[in-house]
């Protein structure tokens, strides 16, 4: 076995991707290269940040690019040419779910490795027994039915246009239906740019609590305050909320997006409009997420990197 050195690049603006880099570098120090020139392989953990590296350097390295998901309308308008140009520098792709593989399989002849990112069980902990105390600590309503959503849901160029791939409109539709059924429903929001959802909730007269830039420790506490987490996205590679809820025991339902069908029970997946029929199944979710826990969740990444380099040496 040769000594493998990997240089990992993320956009430094995405709270999930940057956390992945920190966890990878911390837990896999033996194969981390902090200098791209000393590396054998470059991992573009977010494929869109590839242009931060001189193409002349990329052409001299083995390159693995992680593609999280493709939003069809944006891809056709802006991203297709960039994908095809970047492809000449990429030796293999990693995607976190089969739905993303289906999106890119016709765009490249390079190998595509399909498996989810790992889950840090030391960060996402089950504190359900302390639910009442946590609600009190964060000023959340003690007796309300709390529905959570932790993401960004408006486009970066303004604070009005919804980021439709994240499904903020579908989320609000679902919450309004739950509220009609249970008047004590309120919402816990976290993440940047939640203005679209906030405006919808205020118009509907639904109470919400908003944590704009919480730490991951706070996010874990907020998960444990919830009665239900709702993923209403149209396109996602994860989202990571699915595996985070799975490992810390938060009840979750989701549209059939990204990893949902690979982690959640079929009873927990809904078509927009049928949210009330979905049932959270924490036992199935926890069982399915177990192989992704650290350090075993790193194994397929190590195998992929070694195979890419082995093919280059053969």
Image (spheres, rainbow, N blue to C red):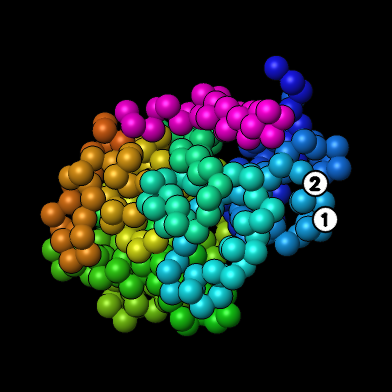
> Measuring 13% from the left and 54% from the top, which residue is drawn there?
277
As for residue 295 lying within the magenta part, the answer is yes
Under circle 2, the secondary element is: loop
Would residue 255 appear left or right of 290 to someone viewing this image?
Answer: left
Q: Which residue is mark 1?
A: 56
Could you tell me how far apart the alpha carbons at marks 2 and 1 are, in whole angstroms? 7 Å
Count residues near mark 2 (Cα–Cα under 10 Å), then give few for <14, some for 14-19, many for 20+.
Answer: few
Would residue 277 appear left or right of 59 to someone viewing this image?
Answer: left
In which image quadrant can residue 80 be found?
Answer: bottom right
In which image quadrant can residue 314 be found?
Answer: top right
**Residue 93 in the image, given as x and y percentages of width and height:** 56, 46
**Residue 255 in the image, given as x and y percentages of width and height:** 28, 56
* The residue stretch that appears in magenta: 286-314
Tell me if label 2 and label 1 are in contact, CB under 8 Å. Answer: yes
Q: Which mark is residue 240?
A: none
**Vertical comparison of 186 with 198: above or below:** above
Nearer the observer, 37 or 286? 37
């Amino acid at each position: 076995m040769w000594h493998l050195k990997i240089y990992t690049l993320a956009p430094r603006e995405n709270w999930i991707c940057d956390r992945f880099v920190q966890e990878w570098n911390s837990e896999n120090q033996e194969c981390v290269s902090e200098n791209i020139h000393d590396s054998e392989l470059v991992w573009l953990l977010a494929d869109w940040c590839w242009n931060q590296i001189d193409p002349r350097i990329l052409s001299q390295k083995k390159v693995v690019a992680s593609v999280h998901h493709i939003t069809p309308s944006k891809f056709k308008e802006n991203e297709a040419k960039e994908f095809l140009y970047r492809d000449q520098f990429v030796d293999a792709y990693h995607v976190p779910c089969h739905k993303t593989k289906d999106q890119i399989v016709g765009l490249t002849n390079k190998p595509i490795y399909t498996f989810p990112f790992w889950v840090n069980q030391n960060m996402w902990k089950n504190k359900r027994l302390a639910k009442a105390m946590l609600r009190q600590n964060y000023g959340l309503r003690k007796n309300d039915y709390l529905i959570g959503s932790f993401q960004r849901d408006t486009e970066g160029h303004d604070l009005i246009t919804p980021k439709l791939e994240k499904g903020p409109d579908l989320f609000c539709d679902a919450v309004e239906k739950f509220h009609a059924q249970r008047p004590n429903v309120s919402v816990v929001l976290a993440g940047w740019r939640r203005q679209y959802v906030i405006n919808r909730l205020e118009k509907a007269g639904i109470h919400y609590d908003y944590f704009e830039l919480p730490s991951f420790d706070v996010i874990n506490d907020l998960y444990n305050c919830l009665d239900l987490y709702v993923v209403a996205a149209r396109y996602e590679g994860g989202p990571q909320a699915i595996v985070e809820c799975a490992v810390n025991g938060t009840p979750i339902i989701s549209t059939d997006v990204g990893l949902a069908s690979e982690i959640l029970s079929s009873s927990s997946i809904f078509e927009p409009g049928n949210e009330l029929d979905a049932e959270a199944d924490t036992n199935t979710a926890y069982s399915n997420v177990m192989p992704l826990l650290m350090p075993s969740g790193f194994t397929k990444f190590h195998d992929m990197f070694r195979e890419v380099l082995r093919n280059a040496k053969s």
